[in-house]
Image (cartoon, rainbow, N blue to C red):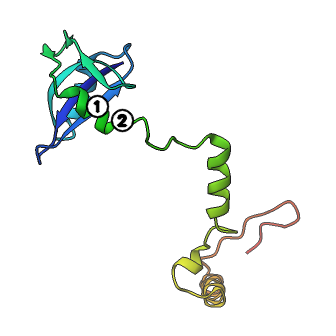
């Protein structure tokens, strides 16, 4: 595994760990956009947490304190992410029976919504604004 250590505006340091196939410089470029500074980089293992080496692309070396930062951020005792089947069950139990309807979210009762729609249709029909379209069983008459 590879890692970079970044420092935020509050001077807190965090480890970002990624696979060896990815270049240090690419990960650093992505995280620089989030207002953090890269302060060290190298290689690591997680159990036990240990950091060593350097990044050729960033021209930065690992520091002795990087191992403790990696150990703190990636504690092996942390709870693991549930598998896909467990997540499906959790999400299914939290999902409402049906998504909210537009009139429910707008605070308008269904009856008022239907009445207003019918009133608009009647006004359009009387003013000649409504266009009737021919369907399979209808003539195009107005």
Tell me where residue 13 sits by quadrant.
Answer: top left
Q: Which residue is mark 2?
A: 74
Do the residues under discs 1 and 2 have CB atoms within 8 angstroms? Answer: yes
Q: Residue at x 36, y 35 (%)?
A: 74
Q: Nearer the viewer, residue 84 or 62?
A: 62
Q: Nearer the viewer, residue 122 or 93?
A: 93
Q: Which residue is mark 1?
A: 70
Tell me where residue 30 sits by quadrant.
Answer: top left
Q: Quadrant of the C terminus?
A: bottom right
Q: Residue furthest top?
A: 56
Looking at the rendered structure, the secondary structure element under dot 2 is loop
Looking at the rendered structure, the secondary structure element under dot 1 is helix
Is 82 above or below relative to 23? Answer: below
Q: Residue at x 37, y 14 (%)?
A: 20
Residue 48 in sight here: yes
Residue 29 in sight here: no
Q: Is residue 84 left or right of residue 49?
A: right
Q: Is residue 8 left or right of residue 139?
A: left
Q: Quadrant of the N terminus?
A: top left
Q: Nearer the viewer, residue 8 or 109?
A: 8
Q: Residue at x 61, y 90 (%)?
A: 112
> How far across and how far down the image is residue 120, in percent?
60, 84
Is 95 above or below relative to 127? Answer: above
Q: Is residue 102 left or right of residue 7?
A: right
């Amino acid at each position: 595994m590879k890692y970079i250590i970044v420092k935020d505006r509050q001077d807190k340091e965090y480890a970002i760990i990624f696979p060896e196939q990815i270049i240090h410089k690419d990960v650093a470029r992505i995280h620089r956009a989030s207002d953090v500074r890269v302060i060290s980089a190298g290689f690591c293992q997680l159990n036990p947490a240990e950091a060593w080496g350097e990044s050729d692309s960033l021209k930065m070396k690992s520091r002795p304190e990087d191992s403790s930062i990696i150990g703190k951020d990636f504690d092996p005792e942390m709870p693991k992410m549930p598998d896909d089947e467990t997540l499906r069950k959790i999400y299914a139990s939290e999902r409402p029976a049906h998504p909210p309807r537009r009139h429910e979210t707008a605070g308008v009762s269904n009856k008022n919504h239907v009445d207003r729609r019918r009133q608009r249709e009647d006004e359009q029909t009387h003013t000649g604004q409504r266009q009737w379209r021919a369907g399979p069983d209808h003539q195009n008459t107005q």
